[in-house]
């Protein structure tokens, strides 16, 4: 599937766009209720490294949405913020399984239903909770070790390590759902799928970095509630389309390995 075709096909599976929009709008409203709108226009950007349900929070350096732990670093967050953050993270991990399953159905041209989305969300929610915790602890441990060994440069080295690992295991979340596998098995298989399709995958990774970096830069420069709202809608569509193209590449690699 070419990237242009993915942008057209994703429109035939509206849940892939509506789900991340609904989750981000909920998080945005909750964030406004807890701390209000904070920050000013700036020159800054982030690149998308997360796979699965898209979120504008992955594009902004101010943790405005309580769907990430960094939200608690904002000044003035009340204690109830912890409950909101945990609830949003659980909701995101629940949606992850259904979202990825729908990507697979779209890549294969199958019919997607809300009922199947909900069933897959329940089936894989716990696995994604453990994956999130594993990644969080791994980042903390590796960053702490590298900073201890190399001081300031350790932060840069940690960033490089995580970017490389994220690319090498870019299909990890997809593999958990497609192969119905546990984390250990999914790590091995996702690496196999990457090796089988690394040229196409790297082209799509670059295709993911370019628009995500551009969207991030524009949101930061035009920093306002309206910029965030527009970013929520555009990122849901653009990132979902690129992930659909990645899912197609994965399905092809998976069939080639099984032959």
Image (cartoon, rainbow, N blue to C red):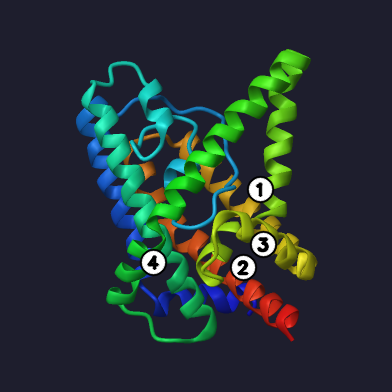
What label sits on residue 98 in the rendered view? Answer: 4
Label 3 and label 1: CA atoms lie apart by: 11 Å
Residue 157, percent from left and from top: 75, 28
Decide: is 179 above or below 36.
below
Name the quadrant of the N terminus: bottom right
Q: Which of marks 3 and 1 is in front?
A: 3
The mark that comes first in sequence, 3 or 2, is 3
Q: How many residues crowd mark 3 within 10 Å: few (<14), some (14–19), many (20+)?
A: many
Label 3 and label 4: CA atoms lie apart by: 19 Å
Label 3 and label 2: CA atoms lie apart by: 12 Å
What label sits on residue 246 in the rendered view? Answer: 2
> What residue is pinned by disc 3?
190
Label 1 and label 2: CA atoms lie apart by: 14 Å
The mark that comes first in sequence, 1 or 2, is 1
Disc 2 is placed on an element classified as helix
Query: Is residue 171 shown to the viewer in this render?
Result: no
Q: Would residue 89 appear left or right of 213 to someone viewing this image?
A: left
């Amino acid at each position: 599937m070419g990237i242009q075709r993915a942008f057209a096909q994703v429109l035939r599976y509206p849940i892939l766009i509506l789900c991340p929009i609904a989750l981000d709008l909920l998080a945005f409203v909750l964030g406004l209720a807890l701390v209000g709108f904070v920050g000013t226009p700036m020159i800054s950007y982030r690149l998308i490294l997360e796979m699965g349900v898209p979120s504008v929070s992955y594009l902004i350096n101010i943790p405005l949405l309580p769907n990430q732990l960094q939200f608690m670093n904002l000044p003035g967050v009340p204690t109830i913020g912890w409950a909101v953050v945990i609830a949003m993270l659980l909701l995101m991990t629940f949606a992850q399984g259904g979202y990825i399953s729908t990507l697979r159905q779209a890549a294969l041209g199958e019919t997607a239903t809300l009922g199947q989305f909900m069933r897959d969300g329940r089936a894989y929610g716990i696995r994604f909770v453990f994956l999130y915790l594993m990644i969080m602890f791994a980042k903390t441990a590796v960053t702490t070790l590298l900073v201890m060994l190399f001081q300031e440069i350790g932060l840069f080295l940690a960033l490089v390590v995580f970017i490389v690992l994220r690319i090498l295991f870019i299909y990890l979340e997809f593999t958990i759902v497609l192969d119905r596998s546990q984390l250990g098995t999914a790590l091995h298989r996702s690496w196999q799928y990457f090796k089988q399709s690394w040229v196409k995958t790297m082209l799509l990774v670059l295709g993911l970095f370019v628009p995500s970096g551009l969207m991030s830069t524009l949101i930061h420069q035009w920093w306002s509630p309206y910029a965030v709202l527009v970013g929520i809608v555009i990122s849901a569509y653009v990132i979902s389309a690129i992930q659909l193209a990645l899912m197609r590449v994965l399905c092809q690699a998976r069939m080639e390995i099984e032959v």
